[in-house]
Image (tube, grey):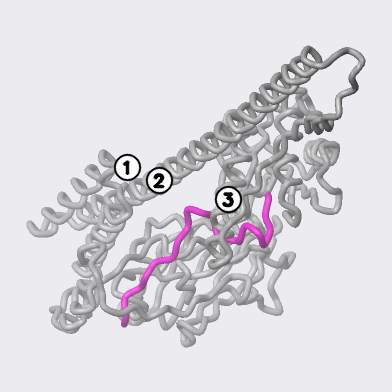
């Protein structure tokens, strides 16, 4: 059997960062707008659940179905898809499709690659530890991606005979990062389309794995991995070179695929490390700027206090000089000096922003507030959910706050008070759906002046882990309380996020 292989995928392997004359926006599909529903596949022995897949506006002819069965400790998924056309139709950088599970809280998990054969059909059998989730299929530049692109081509559809509790997905689009895996592609490469040769299925799969690995390496390099994750990127490049050499020498297919896949995974590690270290650099810069502003404020207050002290000393000296020069019986006709103004109370400095650019105002205000929150000594991050202040499990004595944490929360509360209109959500992450620790945090914030109607408490349970629950250390990290601060004044996009251009098709 012969299929058209390299002609379809060769155009995706290009030099990252090349300039193009014109950019064409790609239609964006969001989970919430498409009303995808999650299913809680409760443990039902011998009772699998049937669901369907339907194509979005990006792939209206696409369809599929899946059998999902919840078992002790796992959920088995047997999915089948039809009319899975080449992903390069969405851009030259897209080489494959990936099936994702989306939890009701918006967390995305890569379930596996959806690779169609010459008949445009694909099958996938996978296992996940999730119980409640919806499913979508996206076009991606390589299979090892860790977050879905916005090129959503199929999504699950609930059937009348679906078994299980239906839950709405509360994911907002900003929880699914945009453009993290794309880069500009030279428009003149379109001239090369259709010049590829016919290859067999095995060679096509080998080449596809190699091209995906090359995409992964180039995207990591375009993100700055040469600077931030040089060792990891070098290892990915070495694995890619090995896979290419094995393919040139017509070596064993399994060795070629193994090296190519490992190269893609390692390059994705380099990309993720780069993104994290870039964020850390920006965080450090924001904290340094906040420190400089604090030092300037303290210096200004010290200068003002010194000026008041000098004025008081001058006033006293002048009055003594007048008393010495006038006879005792003479009443001075000089007007009394005005009283010294009281020192100004310590406040949070609200930096006024220029009004000519609303988005820039929000971004700058977000950075300023982020730096002020960082002064509380609690871990602070900027996320799509908002400015996130994390209180770890060891800051609690049972369900009560440790005494030193109350002082740290007073600083957080003073920042929130300084910017009316901010919303506060206190999430209790733990082994159960209890919200007692979050209630303790809310009480501390209210005691420091945050209005009660500005705070929402939500028990999250173990639905939003940040580490593996397989180890005691991981479970300790997952038992935390998060204060998510958001509002229109600081916008919905983290200061480190940005949009990316896609190539014209």
Q: Which residues are magenta?
A: 485-505
Quadrant housing residue 326:
top right
Quadrant housing residue 481:
top right
Q: Secondary structure at mark 2?
A: helix
Q: Are marks 2 and 1 in contact (CB under 8 Å)?
A: yes
Q: Is residue 474 left or right of 261 when viewed as pictured?
A: right
**Which labelled disc corresponds to residue 228?**
1
Where does label 2 land, which residue? 278
Q: Residue at x 69, y 61 (%)?
A: 40
**Which labelled disc corresponds to residue 102?**
none
Badge 2: residue crowd in 10 Å (few <14, some 14–19, many ≥20): some
Vertical comparison of 351 with 149: above or below: above
The image shows residue 274 at horizontal and vertical percentages of 36, 46
The image shows residue 474 at horizontal and vertical percentages of 57, 34
Where does label 3 land, which residue? 129
Q: Secondary structure at mark 3?
A: loop
| Mark with earlier residue (2, 1) | 1
Quadrant housing residue 158:
bottom right
């Amino acid at each position: 059997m012969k299929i058209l292989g390299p002609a379809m995928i060769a155009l995706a392997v290009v030099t990252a960062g090349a300039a193009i004359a014109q950019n064409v926006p790609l239609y964006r599909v969001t989970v919430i707008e498409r009303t995808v529903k999650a299913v809680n596949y409760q443990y039902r022995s011998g009772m699998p659940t049937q669901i369907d897949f339907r194509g979005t506006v990006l792939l209206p002819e696409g369809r599929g179905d899946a059998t999902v069965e919840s078992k002790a400790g796992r959920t088995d998924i047997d999915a089948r898809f039809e009319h899975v056309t080449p992903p390069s139709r969405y851009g030259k950088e897209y080489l494959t499709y990936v099936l994702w599970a989306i939890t009701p809280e918006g967390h995305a998990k890569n379930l596996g690659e959806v690779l169609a054969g010459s008949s445009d059909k694909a099958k996938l059998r996978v296992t996940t530890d999730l119980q409640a989730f919806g499913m979508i299929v996206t076009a991606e530049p390589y299979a090892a991606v860790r977050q879905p692109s916005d090129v959503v081509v199929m999504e699950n559809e609930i059937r009348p005979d679906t078994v299980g509790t239906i839950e709405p997905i509360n994911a907002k689009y900003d929880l699914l990062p945009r453009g993290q895996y794309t880069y500009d592609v030279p428009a003149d490469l379109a001239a090369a389309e259709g010049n590829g040769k016919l290859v067999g299925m095995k060679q096509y799969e080998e080449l596809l794995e190699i091209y995906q690995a090359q995409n992964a390496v180039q995207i990591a390099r375009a993100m700055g991995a040469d600077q931030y994750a040089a060792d990891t990127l070098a290892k990915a490049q070495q694995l890619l070179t090995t896979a290419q050499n094995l393919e040139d020498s017509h070596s064993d297919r399994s060795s070629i695929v193994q090296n190519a896949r490992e190269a893609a995974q390692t390059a994705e590690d380099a990309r993720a490390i780069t993104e994290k270290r870039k964020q850390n650099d920006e965080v450090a810069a924001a904290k340094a700027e906040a420190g400089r502003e604090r030092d300037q404020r303290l210096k200004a207050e010290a200068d003002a206090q010194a000026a008041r002290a000098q004025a008081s000393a001058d006033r006293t000296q002048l009055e003594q000089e007048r008393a010495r020069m006038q006879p005792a019986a003479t009443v001075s006709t000089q007007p009394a000096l005005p009283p010294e103004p009281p020192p100004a109370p310590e406040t949070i400095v609200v930096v006024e922003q220029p009004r000519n650019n609303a988005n820039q105002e929000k971004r700058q205000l977000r950075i300023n507030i982020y730096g002020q929150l960082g002064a509380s000594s609690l871990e602070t991050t900027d996320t799509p959910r908002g400015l996130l202040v994390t209180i770890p499990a060891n800051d609690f004595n049972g369900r009560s706050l440790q005494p030193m944490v109350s002082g740290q929360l007073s600083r957080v509360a003073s920042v929130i008070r300084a910017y009316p209109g901010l919303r506060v959500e206190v999430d209790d992450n733990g082994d159960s759906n209890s919200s007692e620790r979050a209630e303790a945090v809310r009480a501390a914030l209210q005691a420091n002046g945050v209005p009660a109607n500005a705070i929402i408490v939500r028990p999250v349970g173990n639905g939003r882990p940040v580490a593996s629950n397989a180890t005691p250390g991981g479970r300790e990290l997952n038992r935390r309380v998060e204060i998510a601060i958001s509002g229109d004044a600081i916008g919905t996009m983290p200061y480190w996020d940005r949009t990316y251009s896609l190539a014209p098709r």
